[in-house]
Amino acid sequence: MYSTTPLANTFQASILHIDMDAFFTSVEQADHPELRGQPVIIGQSQRGVAAAASYEARRYGVRSAMPIAQARKLCPQGIFLPGRMARYKDVSAQVMAIIQDLCPVVEQASVDEAYADISGMTQLYASPRVLAEHLKKTIQAQTGLTCSIGIAPNKFLAKICSDWQKPDGLTVLPPEQVRTFLDTLPVSKIPGVGPRWHKELLSLDISMVPDVLRFSRAFWTARYGQRGDMLYDRALGVDLRPVLSHEERKSCSAEHTLDADTKDRDILRHWLLLQAERVGHELRKIQKKGVCVSLKLKFNDFSQCCRNITLGMATNTTQDIYAATTALLARQHLTRPVRLIGTGVSQFRLTAGLLPVIRTEQQAKQQKLDTTLDTIRNKFGMNSIARADSQIARACVTTDLLSKKSQRSDPE
């Protein structure tokens, strides 16, 4: 018989997990009422994957991360959209502001989900359920979107509960019901247990959470290391992670799956320029500079490599990032066609409050150009203006894609 003593350690907190329902597609349906009730999928490239699928599309078997080609076969009547990440971020910020206004400690876990520590808030609300209901109504009134909320003694249980009655659900798990809840829970429901690990656990005849406790903690730790230790804790109902109100970003990146595999360095450099603009804009927005610039390449056989360069001075300038990635690309021997290309900057340094660094005249011009473009884009959107070389790069990429499509359709 397993011990339930560790559960007592988790009862001191009341954790809320909020998960927006089909966030990307719901934003599109809220902004465009004619899309409501329609199977909407975010993603258009035949070689890409679906970033999101509405509940209407999910009825046909479409899921996020599914190849677009497969999604089109399952749901030929689906409405495939390119996605508007800037818009989703704006709505996300609005949702997070609502949560922060109502809850004292909030940790944003992703663009569409967050944790909140609501322990001790019974003086303001009659119960956690009353608070959650008020939060759901406020979000829907201000954004037109629904969300699902789970409330439990710790983070992993709250996350499971938020998925329990989707969409527009609310599940509250009182401390005294945790053991009963876990005893009937499939092990695949534990966050972190993905399809591959689940298959390994099934080979050990582990299908339900209580099955984990047939083996000792030492067994799981020896077999899987920290993952095994975590699994044993979760089977006991233990998760000691606190809700952290702020987690520092460690990198900023952009990547693109090409519509056609290529070894053409001109095409790859064009994409690096467009990505440098995106990454540089994001770095300047969060007031960070990085000293490590990365180039990511995935080849047509799905093997990949990542090359890094450490700069002598931290930067968030588009031209500096582009120069670094093109230098890395020049050193890379392309033995196979490239399927995906990406740019990243890490090892951040804060820029707010620092004394200005003496730069060359050319660097000063680039910095002024970046600042001017940022001001316009922040007001009118990322696509409102582009530097000449970026327009040329975008035109070249488009021209090359159309040319390749024409060649593929030409029987000669």
Image (cartoon, rainbow, N blue to C red):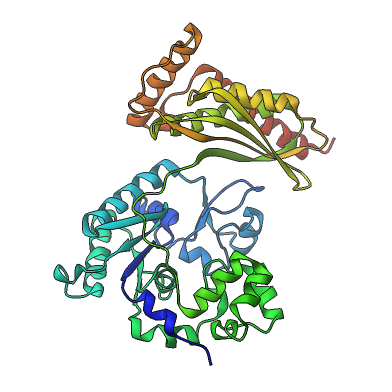
Q: Is residue 344 visible?
A: yes
Q: Residue 24, percent across and down?
A: 44, 53
Among all residues in the image, which is located at the extreme front? 218
> Would residue 104 appear left or right of 110 to someone viewing this image?
left
**Residue 3 or residue 311, whichever sits in front:** 3
Q: What residue appears at the point 35 percent right and 31 percent down from the top-left corner? A: 378
Residue 119 quadrant:
bottom left
Q: Up-down: is 175 above or below 256?
A: below
- Farthest residue toward the right? 412
Residue 309 place in picture, x, y as percent? 63, 29
Residue at image x 63%, y 27%? 325
Q: Nearer the viewer, residue 36 or 19?
A: 19
Left/right of residue 320 with respect to residue 137 in the rendered view: right
Looking at the rendered image, the quarter that the C terminus falls into is top right
Residue 297 lies in quadrant: top right
In this orientation, does residue 390 appear? no
Up/down of 111 relative to 371, above or below:
below
Decide: is 378 above or below 151: above
